[in-house]
Amino acid sequence: SFAGIRWNGALGYLQGANFDARLESCRRLIGASCRGREGYAPRTALDDLWSATPGRYSTVVIATGYNDAAITFPFAVEAIISVARAKGIDRVVWVTYRENVGYVSPSSVSNAATFAANNAVLRAAAGSGDFPELILADWGRYSASRTDWFVYDGVHFTVSGARAAAEYVSRVLAALERRPCPAGIGGATTAGGWCADPDTT
């Protein structure tokens, strides 16, 4: 999970924006979070978003959800976007889930089939026209062949995977904002001079 960016000391690779990285183990989108590796159950993503100061953030990146059930996921997407609108957030960048993995969440709430179903929900929502602020960052596809970035379950990061994930998010945001790639991590550049979308290069 993306909390591994913090565990593996890769926060420094989140570059190019003023990041407020709230990365927690076992966080759920909605409903009570499970108890994570650090011994507590964090607030849900929805609750954390409710706590955001209105007007302070232009973009929220959602990179949690591996512990959410498929049955609640469509409601979670709508709830997250609704709160983002209430907080004046212009972009909801949702990181897609890895599908061909062995990870099973606590209490067997979710697994590879869940992640595939949830990705389908995200793609349908992004294509519906109902959520113009929703932008998918296709981490699932981007990382599909990189077994070296993950431990045995296919979801939790190795040290190199944590760095790759942080760099990926940094480049996605730079591409959306038509900024150069952060100097500290580099990346492919478009003909216009800004950072290329890592999902298309």
Image (cartoon, rainbow, N blue to C red):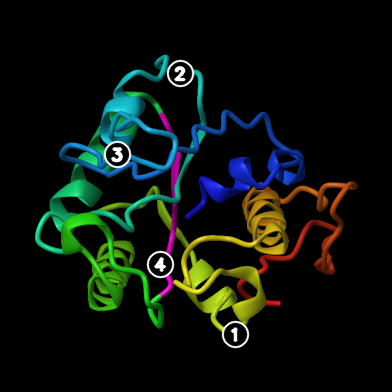
Q: Which residue is mark 4?
A: 97
Q: Secondary structure at mark 2?
A: loop
Q: Secondary structure at mark 3?
A: loop
Magenta stretch: residue 3 in it? no
Task: Give the numbered dot on residue 145.
Answer: 1
Circle 3: residue type? Arg
Is 91 rendered above or below residue 95? above
Circle 4: residue type? Tyr
Task: Give the numbered dot on residue 91.
Answer: none
Q: Measured from the top left, where is residue 32 in percent x and y? A: 18, 37
Confirm or deny contact between disc 1 and disc 3 (CB under 8 A): no
Whole-angstrom CA distance, mark 2 to mark 1, is 38 Å
Circle 1: residue type? Ser
Q: Earlier in the sequence, mark 2 or mark 1?
A: 2
Q: Secondary structure at mark 1?
A: loop
The residue under the point 26% across, 71% down is 111
Q: Which residues are magenta?
A: 89-98
Circle 2: residue type? Gly
Compare residues 23 and 186 and report the one nearer the observer: 23
Task: Give the numbered dot on residue 35.
Answer: 3
Whole-angstrom CA distance, mark 3 to mark 2, is 31 Å
Q: Nearer the viewer, mark 1 or mark 3?
A: 3
Whole-angstrom CA distance, mark 1 to mark 3, is 30 Å
Q: Which residue is mark 2?
A: 55
The image quarter containing residue 100 is bottom left
Whole-angstrom CA distance, mark 4 to mark 1, is 14 Å
Q: Is residue 129 left or right of residue 196?
A: left
